[in-house]
Image: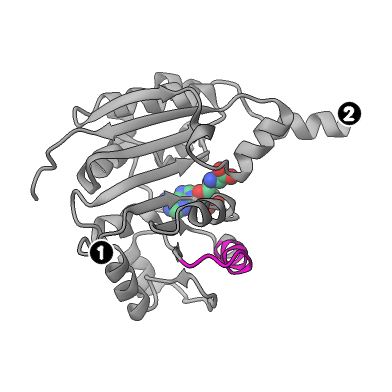
Amino acid sequence: MLRAAMALRKFHVSDTPPALVDGDVAVSRRKAKAIIGGSIEMRRLHGTPTEVGGSFILDPIFRESDLQKLRTLVNPADPRPLVIEIGFQMGEFAAAFCQANPDVRYVGFEVRKKYCQEADALAVKNGIENATFCLVDAREMLRDVLTPGTLDQLLVFFPDPWWKPRHIKKRLLTADFVADAAHWLRPGGRLLLKTDVPGYADWAQGVMAADPHFEVERLTNPAAELPPTLRERRCRFHGYPTFAVAATRRGPVRAV
Ligand SMILES: C[S@@+](CC[C@H](N)C(=O)[O-])C[C@H]1O[C@@H](n2cnc3c(N)ncnc32)[C@H](O)[C@@H]1O
């Protein structure tokens, strides 16, 4: 009984981390340098390619053909809406979303090979045809392959909050990231964050609202429009609240 209670407590960390509340936009911009696994160029030069087989998995760092496939997939000439998810983990949202929206181009990014394989297996099992999973840190790769003003939705669901001050640099949602998102999204396109950490939701909303390209709002019923992620379902099961912040891109998109 006690062990079960402790497991729940471990799962639901709802305390507001001081660094998030205090961390203003300038701090996050300064420290948001860390790319998981090192920069893509350094990984290409010094990393060890791993075998990643799978119907929907791309390894755009180590396989040039996969990089080209990714470029083709995000090509703005393709009329299908482009939806990108960062950190899809087991791919539960991806499978449900792609099944419900067969006409979108879904591209997921994940830094863990194991999750790419899990998501791939789930997509195959569900007969999904419009999902692609990329084994790479999304931030640097998106800068490289996306055409400004062409992305319809950028989804970040339950990102790691990285509580400790020495880990701040690993946080995904920073002023730099939000500025990049403003660059990638088309006018009317949306950056959507879900989290179960109230302090993170408040902080992220502040970071998004500080960017003049976005109209920011809290969604009261995100479940009405999108299927839940694995973590979201777990939160619901345990009765924990979740939070959704949407930043809609105002037009027009600046040229580079
Ligand atoms: C807490 S989990 C996400 C849970 C999942 N989205 C859900 O709602 O059930 C965060 C995931 O993001 C991945 N991740 C973190 N930073 C990333 C990045 N820069 N690019 C791609 N994946 C990233 C991690 O490997 C991890 O699987």
Q: Quadrant of residue 206?
A: top left
Main secondary structure type of the part rendered in magenta = helix
List the residue tagged with mark 1: 78
Q: Is residue 169 above or below residue 95?
A: above
Q: Residue at x 29, y 62 (%)?
A: 74
Q: Which residues are magenta?
A: 116-129
Q: How is the image coloured?
A: one colour
Q: Is residue 127 magenta?
A: yes
Discs 1/2, front: 1
Mark 2 lies on residue: 2
Residue pictured at 37% horizontal, 71% vertical: 60
Residue situated furthest right in the rendering: 1
Is 98 a magenta residue? no
Label 2: which secondary element: helix
**Quarter assignment of residue 105:** bottom left
The secondary element bearing badge 1 is classed as loop
Q: Position of residue 229 (x, y in %)?
A: 58, 44
Q: Quadrant of the N terminus?
A: top right
Q: Residue at x 30, y 47 (%)?
A: 152
**Front residue (pair 181, 50):** 181
Q: Nearer the viewer, residue 46 or 208?
A: 208
Q: Compare residues 171 and 93 and report the one nearer the observer.
A: 93
Amino acid type of the residue that numbered disc 2 sits on in the rendered structure: Leu
Q: Is residue 232 left or right of residue 190?
A: right
